[in-house]
Amino acid sequence: MKVVFENLTKKFPNRDRKSRTEVVAVDHFNFEIPDGELVGLLGPSGCGKSTALNLICGLLKPTAGKIFFDEDDVTELPAQNRGVGMVFQNYALYPHLTVKQNILFPLQNLKGAERPSRGKMLEKVQEAAKLVQIDELMERRPGELSGGQQQRVAIARALVKMPRILLMDEPLSNLDARLRLQTREEIRRIQRETKITTVFVTHDQEEAMSISDRIVVMNQGVVQQIGKPQDVYDDPCNLFVAKFLGTPPINLFHAKVKAGRLYIGEEAVLKTGGVPDQDVLAGVRPEGFLLNEQGALSCNLKGVEVMGRDISVVSSHSCAETAAVRSIISAQNKVDLTSANVRFDLKPDKVFLFDMRTEQRIDFTE
């Protein structure tokens, strides 16, 4: 099922009664979700991603714009008639019902010709439970399950009707780190097996990038960038996207372009062909540093954090926006911890320049 948004906008009244301005949660959202893809809506709290999800499922009506499922305009269609499955952050399971009864509940609410026979219902419940690998837990109640198992029950309940679209609102935020990793792998497996168009809302960029076919980065109700996760990471269109994606986050320096070279402080660190002389913000991904005793960029060494396969060199620089500059390098490198300074060369494809006023990306060739 393809989902298309045309100038989708949602405004809410301002809670400040003295203010006549409305709060714009989603602002002219234009996007097409291809049939069978898993798309991650990604952004900080309050960016409009959950509002967009509620507009898709029909819990909210847009202020302006339209929503299409394939060629059908569903903008005014009631939520119960959209054929959408929803997985909530808090699972929303019925505590007095067994796993089997929780999964069965949506089918029992169907009416008329859509309501299958009792035998068919039980068959569908068993299929959904087996898909999420909880078919041995059918007689337990939610209170007897782990957080990850409860989330699987919620997914099975959403899938049992084989919805046209599956919507997930922060489904992993209540799980611990190890369980989040395991569950997101399961979500990806389930989506691939069912081929149901899925929209996954999260503020966790690692989560979104690891399982999504493409991501939609949002901020203050506005779509910032859409693309495949690695493409967006490697080619951010503006400063917000560059800062939001990446762990550890991108290192930012107040820099300047002069005579075709990028200067951080007094050091020329890269050639910047075609960029006019100007002050810029220079972003360097943590993996964009090459340890070199004769390197172009000198930083004040603060320490080294061992990460196993890699190490994180922690340093500082007077032009850096943050107190710590983090550089991820191979553990095979030897850092002289007795030295006050550490020097690096920079990988050109991991360095991004941004306009100081507009914060838009400035392209350059080395």
Image (cartoon, rainbow, N blue to C red):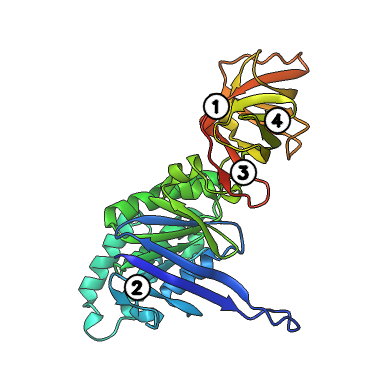
User: CA separation, marks 4 and 3?
Assistant: 14 Å
Q: Nearer the viewer, residue 23 or 330?
A: 23
Q: Which residue is mark 3?
A: 354
Percent of width and height locating residue 302: 75, 25
Mark 1 is surrounded, within 10 Å at the Cα level, by few (under 14), some (14 to 19) or many (20 or more) other residues, namely: some
Label 1 sits on residue: 347
Closer to the eye: label 4 or 2: 4
Q: Which mark is residue 68?
A: 2
Report if the CB atoms under discs 1 and 3 are less than 8 Å apart.
Answer: no
- Which residue in the protein does label 4 denote? 264
Residues marked 4 and 2 touching at CB (< 8 Å): no
- Dot 2: few (<14), some (14–19), or many (≥20) neighbours within 10 Å? some
109 displayed left or right of 344 = left
Q: Which percent across, then down, holds residue 334?
A: 63, 14
Q: Amino acid at mark 3?
A: Phe
Amino acid type at mark 4: Ile
Disc 2 from disc 1: Cα separation: 43 Å
